[in-house]
Image (cartoon, rainbow, N blue to C red):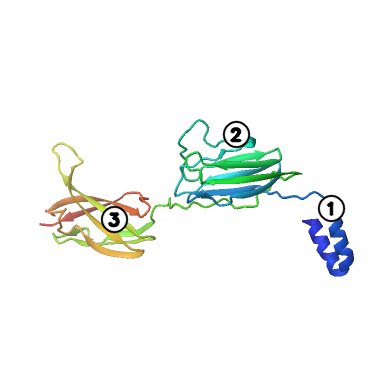
Amino acid sequence: MVHRHLTSWRLRATPLLGLALLAVALLVAPSAWGANRRVAISHYQWSRPQIQLDLGEHVTWYWVGPDTMHSVTGSSANDADLDSDPGKATPRHSIGDSFQLTFNTPGTYDFQCKLHPTVRGTVHVSSVPGDPNTEVDPIPKSHVDLTAPYVDGLSLRSTSFGRLGTALRFGIDERATVDAEYYRLVPRRHRRRPRRKFAGWQQWHAHVGLNDTRFANPGRHFRPVPGRYVATLLFTDGSNNTARPRHLRFTIRG
């Protein structure tokens, strides 16, 4: 990088001398390709199928999904023993898994997935010593949502109401399905804690922002009768991430 900066300055000051120095530099100095690279494996392909490295530099592959059943397996003479999944006919990885190889011999290295041969790429390694410590690429981001919905302000308009139900209010940061399981609290003789008896369930679709919906009202899967209850609420987004269960206690009056 320093040599390029100096050459650019000389070209502006004395164009002919600058061009001469640049030509000599290209003839005398070996060409450096390299940079350690980070590659995402996603949608049945590498994010960077052709990679240029210098000696001693490395490549790190990341499984970012949504497809993760891929390997990085050598398919040429140079890399016959290099494999992210040795001894496995079917590679299996979790979102965020990574695999790194350092290349200390010049040459061309071909890789492909042992299960999907079209998921492939090539690493070209020069004979110029490289920099094994500098990463030029950011860590690839996951293509799969692994974050559960954030729910805030969960409350009932009233904790004691009649058989027509009450209003359930909450805020949420993404679209989700809300499942409520109702349990009637039945007193037990000689025991302080009542028995929980399953009484039914309800489901709603939540939108981003503030939601206000009917709760514990009569429906196909819930027939309210007077008594004390506890409801367990689950908030699940489109990627099947579920927030921690929330519990609400309430009473249905006769």
* Distance of label 3 from label 2 (alpha carbons): 51 Å
Query: Quick check: marks 3 and 2 in contact, CB under 8 Å?
Result: no
Does residue 56 appear in this view? no
Q: Name the mark on residue 178.
A: 3
Residue identified by numbered label 2: 80
Residue positioned most to the left: 254
Q: Residue at x 32, y 54 (%)?
A: 235
x, y percent for residue 172: 36, 60
- Residue 21 location, quadrant: bottom right
Check disc 3 and report its element: helix, strand or loop.
Answer: strand
Amino acid found under the numbered disc labelled 1: Leu
Q: What quarter of the picture does the N terminus occupy?
A: bottom right
Q: Is residue 237 above or below residue 92?
A: below
Query: Quick check: marks 2 and 1 in contact, CB under 8 Å?
Result: no
Q: Residue at x 14, y 39 (%)?
A: 188
1 or 3: mark nearer the eye? 1
